[in-house]
Image (cartoon, rainbow, N blue to C red):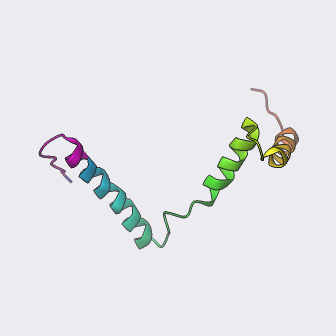
Amino acid sequence: MIINIPRRNAFNIGQFYYMMEKSVALSGYLAGHNPFIQPGVEAYKKAIFAMAGKPGSEEYGKVITEAINRMDRTVI
């Protein structure tokens, strides 16, 4: 596939990005997946906020710290 962008300006590059985003969404739906549901992203954000010490996430921070401490450590 050859994509020709006539002028390299913000408008045409924006159109190209929009086309690519739409193609990813459409191919996800055609494959039977919803590309906009990302359950792992919310869990990741909660874990990062807890580890960074964000106010209000202290309880989850304890859970994360305990889980990390229970992991086996392999020294290479």
Query: What is the count of numbered marks?
Result: 0
The N terminus sits in image quarter: bottom left
Viewer-side residue, 49 vs 38: 49
Q: State whether residue 7 is above or below residue 33.
A: above
Q: What's the residue at 83%, 40% (across, down)?
A: 65
**Furthest residue in direction left, as rendered:** 6
Q: Position of residue 35 (x, y in %)?
A: 48, 63
Asked which quadrant contains residue 40, the reply is bottom right
Task: Tell me what residue is drawn at x 11 percent, y 46 percent.
Answer: 6
The percent position of residue 63, horizontal first and vertical second, equals 84, 48
Q: Find the magenta span and give its range.
A: 2-13
39 vs 4, left or right, is: right
Image coordinates of residue 8 in percent, x first then y, are: 18, 40
Q: Of residues 68 and 47, which is closer to you in this image?
A: 47
Q: Give me the residue at 70% from left, 42% from top.
A: 49
Whether residue 3 appears in magenta in the rendering, the answer is: yes
Q: Residue furthest front?
A: 55
Magenta segment, prevailing SS (helix, strand or loop):
loop
If the image is split into quadrants, where does the C terminus sit? top right
* Residue 32 in the image, given as x and y percentages of width and height: 48, 73
Kindly identify the residue that appears in the image at 15 percent across and 48 percent down: 4
Instruction: Pick the residue in front: 37 or 46.
Output: 46
Which residue is the extreme one toward the top? 76
- Indicate left or right for 44 with 67 as reference: left
Q: In the image, 23: left or right of 3? A: right
Of the pair 63 and 24, the residue shown nearer to us: 63
Q: Is residue 49 magenta?
A: no
